[in-house]
Amino acid sequence: CGTLYLDCNIRDGEYNAAFLGNRFKRIVVGPNVEYLSSLSEAKQLKRIEFTNPSRLSRISKISHTQIEELLIPSGVTEFSISFNKLLRRVTIPRSATTLKSYALAHCLNLDEVKLHDNIQHIGRGCFEDCIQLSNIILPPKILSVEEDTFAGCTNLTDISFPEGIQKISRNAFKGCTQLKQIIVPHSVNRIER
């Protein structure tokens, strides 16, 4: 139990090598950290706090935690926090213009994601198996819905496409059994099968 204060970069494998078996419930990320990676064995972790100001630009491979809500700090341009079963809410900063492939996949309780207008690309499988996600509004700069983006989102009932979207990829909505209505705008020129 307790708190880990980090003011250094954590690369793949370093957290597990140094802190494996510890039961930190809280991590405070200091102002000098530029990237945070591989907290996949932080199974007791309930909260990550970020100092302000922060130099953090990348968060990756944070999975299998007990985090329920994550406010990603301003300045972060890419992140991957998939396989967090208890995660319910994510706030994405305006500095992130791309959501990487599988960035939020398998976050089974995720029911609220705030997508801001600066997001230009949502990667393959980004929301795959987010079974509590019920509605989403795609930002106006999105040009395509990639393969498996919402596959397995069994509670997804509503989705709004922006005018300007051009492509809907294969299996983008596979297994979305509760979708009531999709209005495909005139701008779509390709639906893959």
Image (cartoon, grey):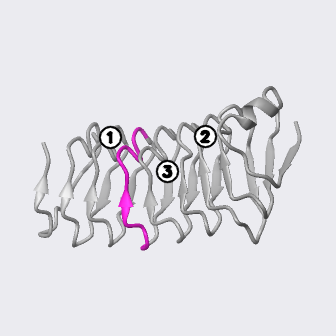
For marks 3 and 1 on the same chain, the one whose residue lies earlier in the sequence: 3
For marks 2 and 3 on the same chain, the one whose residue lies earlier in the sequence: 2
User: Rounded to the nearest whole Å, what is the CA distance between mark 2 and mark 1?
Assistant: 19 Å
> Which label belongs to residue 86?
2
> Which label belongs to residue 151?
1
Image coordinates of residue 20 in percent, x first then y, are: 78, 28
- Main SS of residues in magenta: loop
For marks 2 and 1 on the same chain, the one whose residue lies earlier in the sequence: 2
Seen from the viewer's position, the closer of residues 35 and 61 is 35
Q: Is residue 45 above or below residue 75?
A: above
Range of magenta residues: 117-129
At 11% from the left edge and 69% from the top edge, which residue is drawn? 186
Q: Secondary structure at mark 3?
A: loop
User: Rounded to the nearest whole Å, what is the CA distance between mark 2 and mark 3?
Assistant: 10 Å
User: Rounded to the nearest whole Å, what is the CA distance between mark 3 and mark 1?
Assistant: 15 Å
Seen from the viewer's position, the closer of residues 162 and 144 is 144
Image coordinates of residue 30 in percent, x first then y, are: 81, 59
At 12% from the left edge and 42% from the top edge, which residue is drawn? 193
